[in-house]
Amino acid sequence: MPSMREVTVRSELPGLSRVVNAESVKAYADAGGDQNPLHQDEASARAAGFPGIIAHGMFTMGHLAAFVSRWAGGPDRIRRLTAQFRAPVHMGEEIVAGGRVKAVDVERGVALLECWVSVERDGGTEWPIKRGEAEVLLDP
């Protein structure tokens, strides 16, 4: 768990990556109850203009939450997590959650993080989640 003594503004957090696959997306759909065919059926996804099945936005947000939780020392240390969904995630892509410390509030004992999820696509970086922000508790 990070402490106020260790955390410095603008420091980068170690990233967290995962390859998105149909089995994980299907498990997410079953757990969350979102059975939209865009997330399970190739033909439906293609008819909607995608190259194939796409992950749920909240599947990608869950990856961001896991990243913040790992850095913070557990989900109970997250006080707030927000994000903007900017691009779909396709099967077989590697998503990478990243972030940096934006501010430290010593009086409240929290760090404010700027965070995102990126994917390398067509020779460049895209941002399925951009302008994310998390507030996490720090150890004294």
Image (cartoon, rainbow, N blue to C red):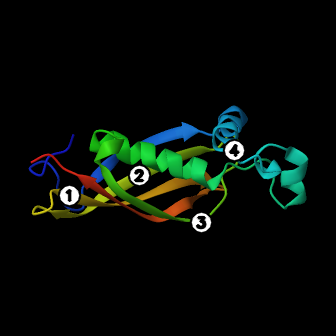
| Element marked by disc 3 | loop
Apparent side of residue 9 relative to residue 72 in the rendered image (left or right): left
Of labels 3 and 1, the one closer to you: 1
Q: Earlier in the sequence, mark 4 or mark 1?
A: 4
Q: Which mark is residue 36?
A: none
Q: Residue flagged by tag 2: what amino acid is it? A: Gly
Residue bearing mark 2: 98
Q: Is residue 7 visible?
A: yes
Residue 86 disc label: 3
- Residue at 45% x, 58% y is 116
Task: Give the mark nearer the N terminus: 3 vs 4.
Answer: 4
Question: From this viewpoint, is residue 96 visible?
Answer: no
Give SS at disc 4.
Answer: loop
**Quarter that holds the N terminus:** top left
Of labels 2 and 4, the one closer to you:
4
**Residue tagged by mark 4?**
33
Say which residue appears at 10% left-offset and 63% top-offset.
107
Residue type at mark 1 is Val
**Mark 4–mark 1 distance (CA, rounded to whole Å):** 34 Å
From the viewer's perspective, is the residue at label 4 or at label 1 nearer? 4
Please state which of residues 105 and 102 is positioned toward the viewer in this rendering.
105
